Image (spheres, coloured by chain):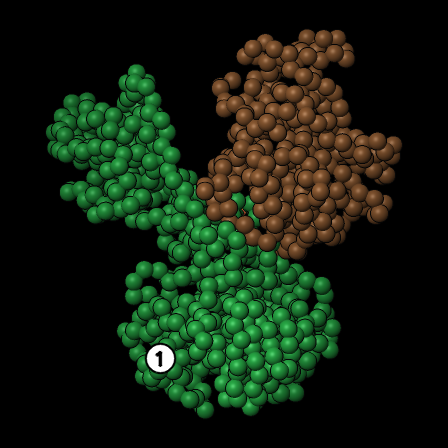
Amino acid sequence: MLDLAKSRWHPIAAAHDLPLRHVFHGQLLGREFAVWRADDGYVNIWENRCLHRGVRLSIGINDGRELKCQYHGWRYSNRTAGCTYIPAHPADAPARTITNRTFAAIERYGLVWSAEEPQGEVPEVAGLAEGRLLALRGIPVNAPADVVAARLKGYRFQPSGRIDGSAAKVAVEAASTFSVVLRSSEADATTLAVFFVQPVDSNRSVIRGVLDGQVEGAARLAVLRHHNELLSRLRLAVEAEAAREPAPAPLEPVIERVSPELAEMPEESKHGRKATIRVEVARKWLAADGIAGFELRPIKGLLPTFQPGAHIDVHLPNGLIRQYSITNGPGESDSYVIGVKLERDSKGGSTCLHETVREGDVLAISEPRNNFPLRRDSVKTIFIAGGIGITPLLAMAQALNNQNLVHELHYFAQNEAQLAFPEKTSTLGASLKPHLGLSPDQTGAKLREILSGYGPDKHVYLCGPGPMLEAARHIAAEMGWPETAVHFEYFKNTNVIDDSTSFEVALARSCMTLTVPAGKTILEVMRDAGIDMPSSCEQGACGTCLATVIEGEPDHQDVYLNDAERKSGTKIMTCVSRAKSARLVLDL
Amino acid sequence: MSTAALCSDRVLLNDWHVVADLANLSVGAPFHTRLLGVDITIHCRGRYNKEVVRDDTGALVTSTKRYGFLWACLGKPERDIVFVPEAEEGDRYLVTGGSIAVKVSGLRMVENFLDMGHFPFVHTGWLGDEPHTEVAPYKVELTAADELVATECKFYQPVASPTAKGGFVVDYIYKVTRPYTVALYKSNPVQKDRLDVITLFVQPVDEDNCVAHPFLAYLKDGIDEAGIRSFMQLIFAQDKPILENQVPRRLPLDPRAETPIRADAVAVLYRRWLRDKPVTYGAIPARM
Ligand code: FES
Ligand SMILES: [Fe+2]
């Protein structure tokens, strides 16, 4: 019976067991669930165990978008159950693959249904009209589900319209291992009652009853009380019957092991520019003057978990590949929203998106990558956005806002009409500070004002046009901000790349020595040699193709590393940077 | 009491374990407890004489008193009770009285004690506070004496101890001396060059239950004994509900059972060390 039970849908909660910001402890066939409804209405049914140290997530905190574990504060996203933040390591983006096990969820008849390995559909009951129902209180019973279901066939009750009567006739309309359909009639009143028996464990069940027809007010209370009393009586009788048999051993559901890489806290998986996900342009709109908004929905399944600051590669119909930051707030996991500015000197990327791509089109995108991770251990975080540089910072500000962490979002633009995504920025309240129509000098003065008052545990995040970033970084340095507190992302690398040198690259772990000739990049030479190396922008701006330098002097030509990182000589962006020494040894 | 699995790990059977705080024992009131799955009763024969008896066989169990606790060994003691040198220093309070029963394997209890990452979330406002959540890299090693030592541990704490006024970064050293014994050394807020010591003797009641017996050796400067005791009780009471919600209750030694991060370096080594001993009682062995 129990093998069969695994593939069936069972109710595991009543819809009203999932009130706002609550986490419900559910159980089916011995397996525990953490069940929670996000503010967008999505019902999450997860293995009730934090992947970190096994603490029950049912004692965690539902903040409406993410579930936070009580023990070390790991955060898991609505829908995907992917971990988005590990507070012990605020500077790192968690490996995307730390994802909890999820189970299917369907709401029907006022109940939440799930299954371990669902086959087929949630049971349809003829005569039960969705919405015009009364769900009874769940009655837990210490007895096996089939024993309970057998007893329920003999359940006698009054129709809701004649609750005070005593002469009702009750007929069994259908019955199976896990459900019984009864009809009670007296005179002109008739009520259909369906009882689903949830197999909690081998010897524990919950009776979840649903009546057809709506009853309101005092009559409703009377009906609920009527069934409560009768079902409690039935419960005692079933338990007495079950107690005569030896209790079956409790079920021991298998908890899946984590992947071998996760057991060792891995690097992110390595791959080149792969567009592994197909999405549909569900919506395209003018997010601001000259900025198109795109909402990208998965063709099938769920989109991977993203973190604030992450970007995706978008593969365009014209063959170009462009990077765009995900602007979503935490838990907004049913689509990715990006903003694309029409560039006057566009090589065809933004023009294609603005002019050719339409709603309903299918695009290929990469998994999200996060090379601009957000620390959440600051006493105050300052975001400084210039123009379309708002996009990653918008995702970040929403994340901090959701956690009530102190932050300011300074948004520089020419005029009001150029402020993008007003529907998102408006949720930030007073932390949003637009600065409109400032000249370069005025911008400098404003940055000075914003960046005054550095203190320990403050961090600043910058994104915007090159000249503004340069200015902001200089001012921050002048005002005493250490480089470790200044985080930035350039849209593009405007440096003129000098690729005239030639040198040798030794790959320490792969035991390989390669020659990089003039006109080719380290990345290209490695790819030619069959080394799988991730990359994205391939112009030294995004940080994806970073490698560790063991020996030799890099010739940095990127805009991703900060000065301290450059000086340390231990990191290199392999897509543009080269070597000053004759040989570089990389940890690859 | 229900029956529990018995222990077959010789390292544990032939070692000493705390079975009671002496302050909780009184003449005329036999004290029932359990050690490694064996139900035992402690009788006080007069003021100084304690007897530990197995409930199943009625046999006398080897026992002795030290550091304010009663200790027992079910087998033949192969080594002495853990030595706490600070207990000999005259300017310290030696404090017991924080013993707390927790429905989880004692090995999980030890691991919790080694874990700084949970301070801001479980001991909010005392041992940590959001958003100061970072666990900076620290060093771990296995010493020649077969002890696990974690050094250069640092954590921001709002109220690190009963005398601390305001938050500061506290330095810690952790030492695991036996499978069920762990010690913590932290800088004293008044005499910065000396360390306060908390040793946690965990009584393996059975595989899924333990009693944590903290033993504190705190410098007396500007502090009172009652204050330390209630601080300690508060901290352990905060851990209890979290630990009792760990699934499974026993400590999994399989590296793929849970997901360690760099902050857990000492726990990773602890699990490996247990696996190598091997200690199986209170653990779920690694799959091959
Ligand atoms: S156990 Fe959940 S965050 Fe550590
Ligand atoms: Fe703790």
Chain for numbered disc 1: A
Q: Is residue A345 left or right of residue B158?
A: left
Q: Which chain is green?
A: A
x 51%, y 58%: residue: A266
Instruction: Identify the image quadrant of residue B243.
Output: top right
**Front-most of residues A160 and A490:** A490
**Front-most of residues A313 and A413:** A313
Q: Residues within 10 Å of mark 1 (few under 14, many from 20)?
A: many
Tag 1: amino acid: Leu
x 43%, y 60%: residue: A305
Residue A368 picture location, percent across and down: 44, 67
x 30%, y 35%: residue: A198
Residue A543 picture location, percent across and down: 53, 73
> Mark 1 sits on what residue?
A316
Q: Which chain is brown?
A: B
Instruction: Identify the image quadrant of residue A374.
Output: bottom right
- Taking B52 as reference, is A437 above or below it? below
**Front-most of residues A8 and A40:** A8
The reply to whether residue A3 is in sight is: yes
Residue B131 picture location, percent across and down: 63, 55
